């Protein structure tokens, strides 16, 4: 919420991601940025990988968006990330182009 209050909306997702990295570091929340998520099919590792914006505490996927509103596509992508990792929780944080902050909790 601090990033949204200070930066507002209309920046690229990459700007918010960098700001959030600063906030998480200063808050001493453990995270990995641009975490590759491996995929498998019938026991075979696939070359294609998903990349999550952040993985916090080694088990929470956090995705940053800058769209009008969080929709089915964003939720479906978060669900795919959860299925790929076996994690149970993802947060989609949208620095909406409408100027509002949206947070969507996705649970597998």
Image (spheres, rainbow, N blue to C red):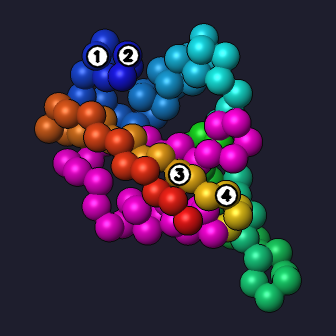
| Residue that carries the numbered disc 1 in the rendered image | 5
| Residue that carries the numbered disc 2 in the rendered image | 2
Say which residue appears at 60% left-offset and 40% top-offset.
54
* 4 and 1 marks in contact (CB < 8 Å): no
| Residue that carries the numbered disc 3 in the rendered image | 90
Where does the image place residue 87, in percent across and percent down from the top left?
Answer: 67, 57
State the extent of the magenta-drawn residues as a range: 56-83
Q: Quadrant of the N terminus?
A: top left
User: Does residue 106 belong to the magenta stretch?
Assistant: no
Q: Quadrant of residue 82?
A: bottom right
CA–CA distance in space, label 3 to label 1: 22 Å
| Residue that carries the numbered disc 4 in the rendered image | 87
CA–CA distance in space, label 2 to label 3: 20 Å
* 1 and 2 marks in contact (CB < 8 Å): yes
- Marks 2 and 3, the one that precedes in the sequence: 2
- Marks 3 and 1, the one that precedes in the sequence: 1
User: Does residue 82 belong to the magenta stretch?
Assistant: yes
- How many labels were placed on the picture? 4
CA–CA distance in space, label 1 to label 2: 5 Å
Q: Helix or strand or loop: what does disc 2 sit on?
A: helix
Say which residue appears at 28% left-offset and 61% top-offset.
71
Q: Helix or strand or loop: what does disc 1 sit on?
A: helix
Local crowd at mark 2 within 10 Å, few (<14), some, or many (≥20)? few
* 4 and 3 marks in contact (CB < 8 Å): yes
Where does the image place residue 36, in percent across and percent down from the top left?
Answer: 70, 52
């Amino acid at each position: 919420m601090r990033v949204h209050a200070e930066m507002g909306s209309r920046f690229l997702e990459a700007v918010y991601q960098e700001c959030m990295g600063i906030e998480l570091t200063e808050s001493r929340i453990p995270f990995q940025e641009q975490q590759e998520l491996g995929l498998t099919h019938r026991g075979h590792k696939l070359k294609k990988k998903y990349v999550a914006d952040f993985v916090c505490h080694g088990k929470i996927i956090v995705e940053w968006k800058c769209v009008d509103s969080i929709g089915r596509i964003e939720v479906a992508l978060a669900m795919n990330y959860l299925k790929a990792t076996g994690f149970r929780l993802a947060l989609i944080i949208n620095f909406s182009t409408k100027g509002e902050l949206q947070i969507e909790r996705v649970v597998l």
